[in-house]
Image (cartoon, helix red, strand yellow):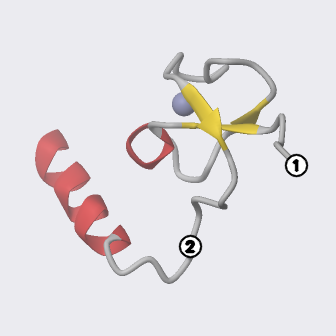
Amino acid sequence: MKSDIRVCSAWRDAHERPVYTLSDTCPDCGADAVNSAPAPFNPEDPYGEYRRALKRRVRE
Ligand SMILES: [Zn+2]
């Protein structure tokens, strides 16, 4: 069964945590919202620290 809940496709870059929505676009940043299943958020994501480091480098 398909879920209607979508998640911001750019939340890792634009937000501190997944942004869920029922619309086609993120209400916060306007990025495409994608189907949330399977759950995209894994607190033990081995690449999370790498992405955060990359994000810091871009901002500095
Ligand atoms: Zn967003």
Residue that mark 1 sits on:
1
Q: Quadrant of residue 60?
A: top left
Residue furthest toward the right?
1
The percent position of residue 28, horizontal first and vertical second, equals 61, 23
Q: Which residue is rendered at x = 30% and y = 61% of the image? A: 52
For label 2, the SS is loop
Check the image and report above or below for 57 versus 43: above
Mark 2 surroundings within 10 Å by alpha-carbon count, few (fewer than 14), some (14 through 19), many (20 or more): few
CA distance for labels 2 and 1: 22 Å
Residue 60 appears anywhere in the view: no
Disc 2 marks which amino acid? Asn
The percent position of residue 12, horizontal first and vertical second, equals 44, 49
Residue furthest toward the front?
1
Disc 1 marks which amino acid? Met
Tell whether 26 sits left or right of 45.
Answer: right
The percent position of residue 30, horizontal first and vertical second, equals 53, 16
Check the image and report above or below for 49 versus 39: below
